[in-house]
Image (cartoon, rainbow, N blue to C red):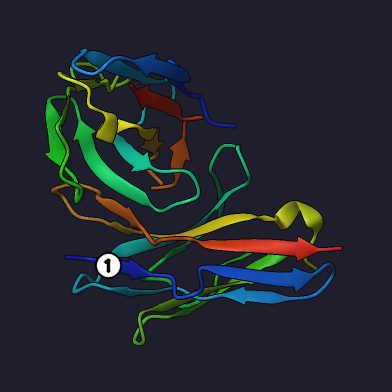
Amino acid sequence: AQTVTQSQPEMSVQEAETVTLSCTYDTSESNYYLFWYKQPPSRQMILVIRQEAYKQQNATENRFSVNFQKAAKSFSLKISDSQLGDTAMYFCAFMKVNTGGFKTIFGAGTRLFVKA
Amino acid sequence: EADIYQTPRYLVIGTGKKITLECSQTMGHDKMYWYQQDPGMELHLIHYSYGVNSTEKGDLSSESTVSRIRTEHFPLTLESARPSHTSQYLCASASTGNTIYFGEGSWLTVV
């Protein structure tokens, strides 16, 4: 069975600085997707960034980028130039891709506080 | 912006009652999911579906059931609600590109 581990329950960063959230996963699959989702307080879960396992190049989305280390099964999220609106719970997610289904599981989350 | 809708958004119900949480998406997505999330906590997959007439149980043992008779509709039913079912229930669907879109959630309180 797949597992997703986020070892940092809570982190804080000063506005305009850079922070990295860690995520590791365990799987025997070769074809899968990885995601980072953001859940602001009392608001809807939204996608931050995604990575296909078959792509070696790390995904980038404006101030958000990932460090995908497939052999190490690591998928960290780097937030550059942190903004107050980045304060949220961040969830790492793993989607298994096969003909039988697309089961998707989430890590426990990291609560990020951006301080002014 | 994704078009996935959950009703009711908030519900308070007595123990033993039967409830159905509705979830609909207008994007034609084949893959749909139900997650349970206590406030500020992790998401637990309780059911998922990869098409009409296909449903699978997730990792979290659940007393709920789901059905997928139409692509756009994926309701979750609790036959007999208990206080332990008090939680937020998140419905989601995934595109062919495998990006997951979430609804706003249904907050259930069982008293």
Label 1 Cα neighbours within 10 Å, binned few <14 / some 14-19 / many ≥20: few
Q: Position of residue A31 (x, y in %)?
A: 27, 66
Q: In front: A40, or A102?
A: A40
Side (left or right) of A93 relative to A85 = left
Q: Chain of mark 1?
A: A
Q: Position of residue A39 (x, y in %)?
A: 57, 47
Q: In front: B40, or A66?
A: B40
Side (left or right) of B47 relative to A58 = left
Residue drawn at the location 26% of the way across and 15% of the way down: B19
The quadrant of the picture occupied by the N terminus of chain B is top right
The quadrant of the picture occupied by the C terminus of chain B is top left
**Residue B27 visible, this angle:** yes
Q: For the residue marked with disc 1, what is the amino acid?
A: Thr
**Residue B30 visible, this angle:** no
Compared to residue A101, the image places residue B53 above or below, namely: above
| Residue pointed to by mark 1 | A3
Element type at marker 1?
Answer: strand
Side (left or right) of A40 relative to A72 = right
Q: Quadrant of residue A83?
A: bottom right
Residue drawn at the location 14% of the way across and 41% of the way down: B57
Compared to residue A78, the image places residue A87 above or below, namely: above
